[in-house]
Image (tube, coloured by chain):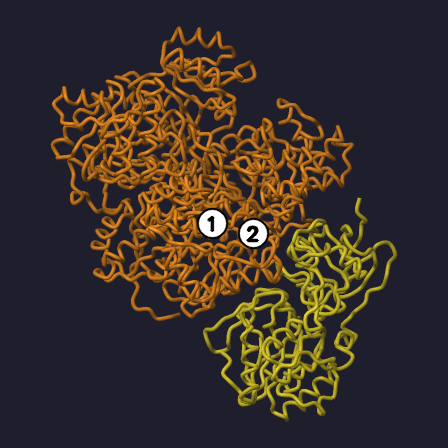
Amino acid sequence: MKQKIKLILEDGTSLEGKSFAAEKPVSGEVVFNTAMTGYPESLTDPSYKGQILVLTYPLIGNYGAPRTEMENNLNKFHESGNIHISGLIVSDYSFEYSHWNAEDSLGNWLKKNNIPGIYGIDTRALTKKLREKGTMLGKIIVDKNIPFYDPNTKNLVEEVSIKKKQIYGTGKYKILLIDCGVKYNIIRSLLERDTTIIRVPWDYDITGEEYDGLFISNGPGDPKQCLATIGNIQKAFDIEKPVFGICLGNQLMALASGADTYKLKYGHRSHNQPVIRTGSNKAYITSQNHGFAVDNKTLSNDWEPLFTNINDETNEGMIHKSKPFFSTQFHPEASGGPTDTAFLFDKFIEMISKNKKVVLV
Amino acid sequence: MIKTGKISKVLLLGSGALKIGEAGEFDYSGSQALKALREENIETVLINPNIATVQTSEKVAGKIYFLPITPYFVEEVIKKEKPDGILLAFGGQTALNCGIDLYKNGVLEKHNVRVLGTPIQSIMDTEDRDLFIKKLTEINVLTPRSIAVSKVKDAILAAESLGYPIIIRSAYSLGGQGSAFCKDKEELHEMASRAFSYSGQILVEESLKGWKEVEYEVVRDGYDNCITVCNMENFDPLGIHTGESIVVAPSQTLTNTEYHKLRELSIKVIRHIGIIGECNIQYALDPNSEEYRVIEVNARLSRSSALASKATGYPLAFIAAKLGVGYGLHELKNSITKTTTAFFEPALDYIVCKIPRWDLNKFDGVSHLIGSSMKSVGEVMSIGRTFEEAIQKGLRMIGQGMHGFVGNRIAGFKNINDELAQPTDMRIFVIAEALEKKFSINKIHELTKIDKWFLYKLKNIIHLKEELTNYNSIKELPVDTLQEAKILGFSDFQLARFVLKSKDDKIANDLITVREYRKSKGIVPAVKQIDTLAAEYPAQTNYLYLTYSGTEHDIDYSGLKKSVIVLGSGAYRIGSSVEFDWCGVNALDTIKQSSYQSVMINYNPETVSTDYDICDRLYFDELSLERVLDIIELEAPEGVIVSTGGQIPNNLAIRLYEQNVKILGTSPLSIDRAENRHKFSSMLDSIRVDQPRWKELTSTGDIHGFVEKIGFPVLVRPSYVLSGAAMNVVSNKDELGHFLEMASHVSRQYPVVVSEFIENAKEIEIDAVAGSGEIIAYAISEHVEFAGVHSGDATMIFPPQKIYFETIRRIKRITRQIAKELDISGPFNIQFLAKDNDIKVIECNLRASRSMPFVSKVLKTNLIELATRVMLGEKVEKPHKSIFDLDYVGIKAPQFSFSRLQKADPILGVDMSSTGEVGCIGEDFYEGILKSMLSVGYSVPQKAVLLSTGEPRSKLEMITSARELNKKGYKLYATRGTQKFLETNEIDAEVAYWPDEKDFPNTIDLIRNKKVDLVINIPKNLSKSELENDYSIRRNAVDFNVPLITNARLASAFILAFCKLDMADIAIKSWDEYQTL
């Protein structure tokens, strides 16, 4: 019989399931994602730092854990150097897996990283609770109780950001990448386009760096925690070299430009978020994972919305009216998720090569 | 919205009769498209001779033509109706092919009819294999290496350059017809010759047997916005037609990169081809790398798109129709949530499993192997939150007596290795047996190439089953294990079988014991919504399923209005298909107009009744006693309607009644009196109604004795159908001996029923509605064929044209007596034999019958609506209409799918073998016959007819029509006996030699070389060589696509019809133009 294990939420809900990974108590914020594929990508996404992840797709572990293979000093099948989630909650775990690229089961992979995993939970009922609450703290308990912990009170970006500068590739265009918890596929997407990446910590003083284009990465938590990054971005805006931001990067650029961010009633946590190029009929399916959004009403006169979410009409990106600065709330690098907007990386390179604003869509 | 010019009237082509490869899914897609157009206030005109469909109903389509979907008739309708646009993507391959012909002939241009949605050129680019490959190569998308050829000789050359094994495919294929694997030159020669009889071009292609088969449903609007609504993974690897495969959605063994690589390719392809609307794209994916090939693109709605719509809740056909009139996806709403956008890719939080249903046992001689061409006649979709739950549910839904993956009474398979390597319709159960016999997963994988993930999951079921058998009472069973069993999809029946070791006669009670115990432990299923977004946002949806992987219902049952539950008809099968869907939908419509909420339970993804917007709550779930009780306990309905869904709900009636469920309408006790042969028979005796003599017998001696008394021929039916001896008419001792040999199981437990068989008797049916035993409305129809042809295979005439008034009077009297005796409240059907004025009752069903939509539409009185109102307790007035008021004739004709069923003898008998039907309206009998025969694929011969007319009586039957053929200048060929008979009657005919003779002209050559364009072959005596010769003629006619008729009365009727009438004589009239007096 499998070890019984509990998930306890701050509202008092207690759910019992069975363990398929490390039998260790953890606390964190409980979040969900509705993607139907891509659990290895999610687990290693630094944006999930401090979070206990609930997968709404019920059958998990089917294709195991991908093998380790390095390419350009990056693990080819992961989104960062390690697993970032604190715990994993699923409905039906597949103890046996089948895939040519797998080297282990998901359970063992988690176990090796000392991360607990629970199956046998009504993840749909749990998700309904989470979506209504906005932010929900929770803890996984095996036998001994532990206190709740709110990761949002910490500067999570600091925890996941690189500690010192690192360089990747030898391409033509030099890109300074501010790492707030960057996903590897962003680096891969840029490297594929003839670039050299200078990856620097979130609070790195960029004034001394030479670059052709600046990239602000995704990352965990409340953007307002990243004051140092915001200050850096303001400086970069003065330099007027092309700037591209993704997810947290979008929010940080908004804050740097004087706009405001807020917490969404219903966060976007899926691979099927519809966005439209604001003011056009061009629509894309995007991968998203965020609880904060840029408030379009607060955009300064120099900026305009770039993309809008078709469902809730929230901001999905912004663009400077004259300068080569733009950002998206969604993830053009996908991984996991749809690749519809990968062309934005091409546009960023085009801006760099011309050193001016170009038409994006 | 893109401005596309004025569209005020649109013509939609349906798909005609249900056939293998083209079934109910097109009723669903057509109905959705018509609904989408109606919302836009666009006038709609529908051509579809399939009268039993929902789409051919008053409120669905504007004008309806029950005419053949052929270029001639469509052009005639276009001339008359002058539509602005035409939709070709909603009627399957039939509509698409017809549309391409109309385009090529310039008909559409001539009449200014715009093709809405995907342009014709794009369709042709996907249909012509050569163009298709060229098109995909332009954008560096890989397709299987292949060579298009138009001669057998070139096919062989091509195969040599690619290397065997190869697969051949024919262009414009329909459900994989004309596609086959060939391992060597001999096989290729045979298959290629056959394929060329359907198509001028075939493709010789590298074989990718064993690769994963994955499909995407892709949508594109006029702004070039694209989405993939769903992907699906075949459990069975490439090599087994997707219509023959178990399919799951979403894919289970694909990683994120694989999933999105194929998704990205789908969008690239759809853009390049220029689809506007929906298409299906099929991939082969290497199980050991990310190598892929695009196998095919279907530029139309398909079986898969219907499945994807049901699997996700995203109404593909509805959206495709809207895109066709100029909308962008982002301008439309998600029909489930009503608030979010249609530019959206559903997120599922469950797994669906589609399982095909085969009815191969219905056919003599057919091969049970499954492969690259489709043989299944229907399918089910099950929903669960574990694969084990979904597949076990699905295997029960199939409705062939299986209880899930395990726990079935199947005689052992002879050679499991062979059965695994060469799959048949039983393959899933072979896997079960292999696992039980401890075959390793690797070994099974090697033999089947099924991904190990699926096999591991199946093994979980076997493991748990083994654990269950360790216990002997339900109370010993640990609650956790019981819970686990339910999560893995075990039914209470399976639990009773494994734990209680229940005997067959006790299990009905024992499963209730299991149920009560499990409820006492709080182990009950949870009701979950299908909301397209996996609970990310709140959504009000009424599309529901039940699962044991859940602790909370999505529905709050408190404060709901009282509901009435309608039980659906399950998987389409031979004998039960779209007609019961029409009945179910009409029952729901009627309930909606009352003060009750309407609830449907059904699991067939091809239907309209499983469209969530036709009722207040849809439970897409099992129609088992267990599941229906689960739902009843939650709904606490006013009552349940069991009489509109065919035999499945009818069989549940008495068991539900025993569980104190309120059944609306006729009492289940009466249903039992009609269903139970003994009870029914003694009831008929007591009200002095005649019936053919019959007896249920338990020994061969008794059988011979009884037959001696009543005389040959007799109708024999074993109660144990798995024995291979189906119901049959036997006309002599030899045949009876042969039958009894096959039915080796004759015993007290497996009796055989022997009934008197009356030759040359007319078969007459009455469909009626009664309230408290009093007839409210009725429709009497007669068969063209004499009794002996199953009523589902017979050609039906309504109102009857050739029966005595006295006969009608007697039939009405008997019907009245029976309705009164059984206190019928609701729909029913009685079948009679009439010879002279002697009337015998042969069958009585206290439920809606197959012919209910046909007679309702011809009579223009909706019998189901009346029946439902009766069942709801409303006061129903008798309609003031009678069959004598009809100034026209309705003809219902069967559609056969023998061409798909390799080696099956295309012959008609007491067991049903048609897969669908049409119903046409004619000014008179002959016009009706001609329309309906043309609608089921016959054509008027141009040159010559081959006659082989069997026994003397059918020879006589054919005299007049043969003479007419002569008069019309047709060349007649006849087999020796027939030729002689014709000669003595002064009818010119040339002798055609039997297949086993060497002389010329030989019957087979005439057929293969298309020297004849109609074959009449009437089966006769049963001597071996005659049998084989006749079989050979019939089978060749089917394989080489020459129209074949095997019944003398039908052949006569058809011949007289086309001899009397020219095409120009056929009235192009819509349904509403046929007025009652």
Of helix, strand and loop, which one carries label 1?
loop
Q: Nearer the viewer, residue B222 or B976?
A: B976
* Disc with the residue nearer the chain's start (1 vs 2): 1
Q: Position of residue B392 (x, y in %)?
A: 61, 40
Write down which chain is painted yellow: A
> In which quarter of the view is residue A235 placed?
bottom right
| Cα gap from disc 1 to disc 2, whole angstroms | 34 Å
Q: Is residue B142 above or below residue B555?
A: below
Q: Chain of mark 2?
A: B
Mark in the foreground, 1 or 2: 1
Left/right of residue B575 with respect to residue A185 in the rendered view: left
Q: Which residue is mark 2?
A: B249
Residue B297 shows in this picture? yes
Q: Which residue is mark 1?
A: B163
Residue beneath the point at 32% across and 21% down: B1026
> In which quarter of the view is residue B762 placed?
top left
Q: Is residue A139 above or below residue B844?
A: below
Q: Residues within 10 Å of mark 2 (few under 14, many from 20)?
A: many
